[in-house]
Image: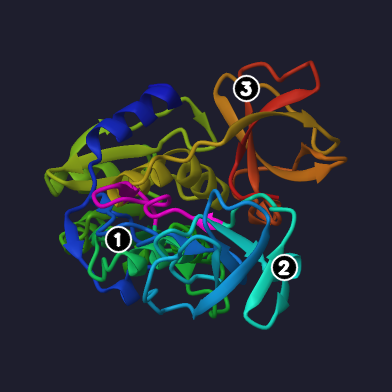
Amino acid sequence: MISLREARRLIAELVTPRAAVSTPLAAAHGRVLAEPVLADAFYPSGDRATMDGYVIAADAPPGAFRVVGEIPAGHVPERALGSGEAMRIFTGALVPKGGGRVVMQEQARRDGDMVTIDPLPEPRFIRPQGSEAKPGDIVLPAGTRLGAAELAILAQVGAVTPRVISPPAICHIATGGEIVAPAAVPGPGQIRDTNSTLFAALFAGLGVAVAASHRGVDDPETLTALGTAPADLLVISGGASVGDYDFGAETLRRLGFTIHFDQVNLRPGKPLTFATRGEQTAFVVPGNPVSHFVCFHVAIRLAVERLLGLTPAWNLLRLELRGGEPLRGNPRETWAPARVAAEAGRLVVTPKRWSTSGDTFSLAGTNALVRIPTEPPTDGFAETLLLDLP
């Protein structure tokens, strides 16, 4: 049995990002850049006004100026500014040669072809050429996840087919002859399948979808046949322990996977199994839903982040405990469902009721996991893994 720290080290070491592909900008949302994106020009392309007003020379003294032209946005100034001259200018317009200060129209007095400016205000309300980016500057580094703002940057620099990490194909197999579809009415000895829905939603939260899902499988031959389907990540729910009907590890061996660990000093989730075959990754997860929830967040999520080329998220904070279920020690490192909330400008954590790893109801409202070493904390604080911002 290995520690969770060692298990995470092995996952981070053995799981590598997927291949890069070019994708249209419209389909790139949520994907991760495989290579940096560079500026293709100066941004802004020239000195530009940041206010509507009048442009004058940078060193011009206060006083009256002759208005010799007008520069709307999108127009190129037809001539340079001379001494004692000003031009009407609008936000975003190019500053003419000889211009170095834009005075807001509210601070200028216009009378025919003359404008009086006294005194000269600061700032100068000019965005200098290249002040945001110069040709060849990295505007988005590799590993950036593309949200709305990042897509706007790609559009600005003309990167309309960015190279991104292709999303992994995920196959999920829920074992157990006793499980039935959520819409079914369970018969004697049967239970509804919660794990397929749980995992589909957890993976979706990382921007990936389960490509193939199977339930009710309970023999090694069928498991092996299903496991041969092309997949970057194979997850088998149940069959992780050492019972007569626990075929998870056996299936992975039949498929040619190398098992790197099959027990972790973890509660819930001790029989968690991790294996690889070439660039393929596989997990066998103990069947109860709380075990699924914990194993996903402390181990499987790391593998998905590595496949996606993301920097792993591990938001472990020391937070003040605020009521809730008393924390109890255990020989294994425990990760208990909890709820983090903001209180008087700070985050506090409330451990949730948790009877067994089969207690799906205890997960309602969970947005954190509290780490409990072999002995519970006595100072009123606990290490807390944030799953979602409160």
Q: Nearer the viewer, mark 3 or mark 2?
A: 2
- Residue tagged 1: 170
Q: Are marks 3 and 2 in contact (CB under 8 Å)?
A: no
As helix, strand or loop, the secondary structure at mark 1 comes to: strand
The spot of residue 57 in percent (x, y) is 52, 56
Is residue 198 visible from the viewing direction of this image?
yes
As helix, strand or loop, the secondary structure at mark 3 comes to: loop
| Dominant secondary structure of the residues highlighted in magenta in the image | loop
* Magenta range: 126-145
Residue shown at 75%/69% (left/top)? 106
- Residue tagged 3: 330
Residue type, mark 3 in image: Asn
Q: Are marks 1 and 2 in contact (CB under 8 Å)?
A: no
Q: Which numbered disc, 1 or 2, marks the residue that appears first in the sequence? A: 2
Residue 70 versus residue 352: which sits nearer the camera? 70
- Above or below residue 146? Residue 299 is above
Residue shown at 17%/54% (left/top)? 19
Q: Which numbered disc, 3 or 2, marks the residue that appears first in the sequence? A: 2
- Residue tagged 2: 108
Is residue 196 visible from the viewing direction of this image?
no
The spot of residue 86 in percent (x, y) is 55, 68
Q: Which numbered disc, 3 or 1, marks the residue that appears first in the sequence? A: 1
Q: Are marks 3 and 1 in contact (CB under 8 Å)?
A: no
